[in-house]
Amino acid sequence: MNWIDIGHIDDIPLRGARVVKTQAGCVAVFRTDTAEVFAVSDACPHRGGPLSEGIVHGHKVTCPLHNWVFDLKTGAAQGADTGHVATYPLRVEAGRILMDAAALTRRSAA
């Protein structure tokens, strides 16, 4: 894997998100209330809502437009909703968030 530094974990508030612009489109990087980090495509498949502006709860995010809920680990829609968002591998080293750049190149542009 080709890891790139995308920022410090403290740059993302607990239960918050930041957007990373990539060649594959915008990626939302989330920090849970337990300081775990996850990265998914920033666009909801339903209406393109910005997931980075959604509500983070546990390991899920709720789309701000139509309340679709996505699992941050798998990218799968929860409940009666169907759909999926791309997920991207992350790791944290010495407080720095690293994203797998190779995973970004395997995705098509958003």
Image (tube, helix red, strand yellow):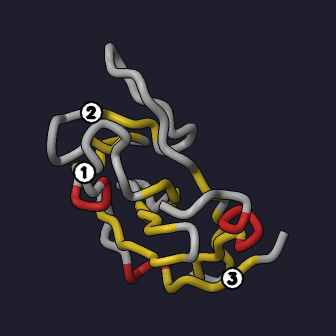
Which label was assigned to residue 68?
Answer: 2
Residue under the image location 73 percent in, 59 percent down: 106
Residue highlighted by disc 3: 4
Q: Nearer the viewer, mark 1 or mark 2?
A: 1
The amino acid sitting under disc 2 is Trp
- Image height check: is 20 above or below 88? below
Task: Examine the image and state in which quarter residue 11 appears.
Answer: bottom left
Q: In which quadrant is the N terminus drawn?
A: bottom right
Furthest-front residue in this view:
109
The amino acid sitting under disc 3 is Ile
Circles 2, 3 touching at the beta carbon (< 8 Å) = no
Q: In the rendered view, does 65 fall on the left or right side of 24? A: left
Q: In the rendered view, does 94 fall on the left or right side of 62? A: right
Task: Examine the image and state in which quarter residue 18 appears.
Answer: bottom left
Circles 1, 3 touching at the beta carbon (< 8 Å) = no
Which label was assigned to residue 49?
Answer: 1
Badge 1 density bin: few <14, some 14–19, many ≥20, Cα 10 Å: some
Q: Position of residue 98 (x, y in %)?
A: 65, 76
The amino acid sitting under disc 1 is Gly
Circles 1, 2 touching at the beta carbon (< 8 Å) = yes
Q: Secondary structure at mark 2?
A: loop
Residue under the image location 30 percent in, 63 percent down: 16
State the CA–CA distance, disc 1 to disc 2.
10 Å
- Image height check: is 1 above or below 53? below
Residue under the image location 49 percent in, 31 percent down: 76
Furthest-left residue in this view:
65
Q: In the rendered view, does 35 fall on the left or right side of 106? A: left
